[in-house]
Amino acid sequence: MGKEEQVMSELWDLFNKKMWLDSFKMKTRLKGFNPSEVHCIEYIGGNEDSNVTKLAETFYMTRSAISKLTRKLIEKGLIESYQKPDNRKEVYFRLTKQGDKIFNVHEELHREYIERDKTVFDKITEEQYDSMLGFTEKFNQHLDAEIKKLGVDITSGWCDKL
């Protein structure tokens, strides 16, 4: 296996382990909520004037999938929709008191994960951080270019090349 494949394999393994560990605790503390619901609540709680388009772009989901998800969250009493007096066309979302509780539990879990992993990050030098960040930035730019080549509108699911 070449270094390129080894890096991608290690990153994939790292991602899967972290997701498994994180979701293990989340499943206990946020029982009854799936990851998409929790991350949608997290985004809405942390970003003013969240709307379907912003959520779709953030989560690389179609607007129709986000509409379905937000309807479900409204039905559960976790978010509510609103419009601004000067813009009756756009619909925005904010957390309800119940949604705030879920948001706060999720934030608490994130703090626990940061503390859990602190021993590793405390040993990383500035140069190592710069190197890792340089790699992820270049790889993200590459993937953005590949997505653009496909002519994909992530928020609608439309692809010019199909």
Image (cartoon, rainbow, N blue to C red):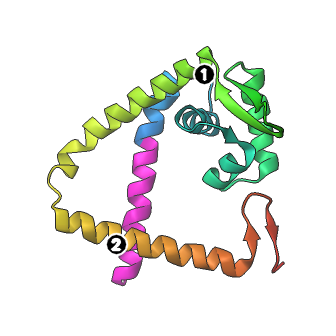
Q: SS at mark 1?
A: helix
Query: Label 2 sits on what residue type?
Result: Gly
Mark linked to residue 134? 2
* x and y percentages locating residue 52 in the rendered image: 74, 44
41 left or right of 154 in image: left
| Residue lying farthest to the bottom in this orientation | 2
User: Which mark is first along the chain, 1 or 2?
Assistant: 1
- Find residue 5 and report its image quarter: bottom left
* x and y percentages locating residue 149 in the rendered image: 68, 82
Q: SS at mark 2?
A: helix
On the question of residue 28 being in view, the answer is no
Query: Label 1 sits on what residue type?
Result: Gly
Mark linked to residue 99? 1
19 left or right of 158 in image: left
Quadrant location, the N terminus: bottom left
* x and y percentages locating residue 72 in the rendered image: 76, 29
Residue drawn at (36%, 84%) of the image: 2
Quadrant location, the C terminus: bottom right
Mark 2 neighbour class, 10 Å CA radius: few under 14, some 14 to 19, many 20 or more:
few
Foreground residue, 104 or 80?
A: 80
Magenta span covers which residues?
Answer: 1-20
10 left or right of 38 in image: left
Mark linked to residue 88? none
Label the magenta part by its dominant secondary structure. helix
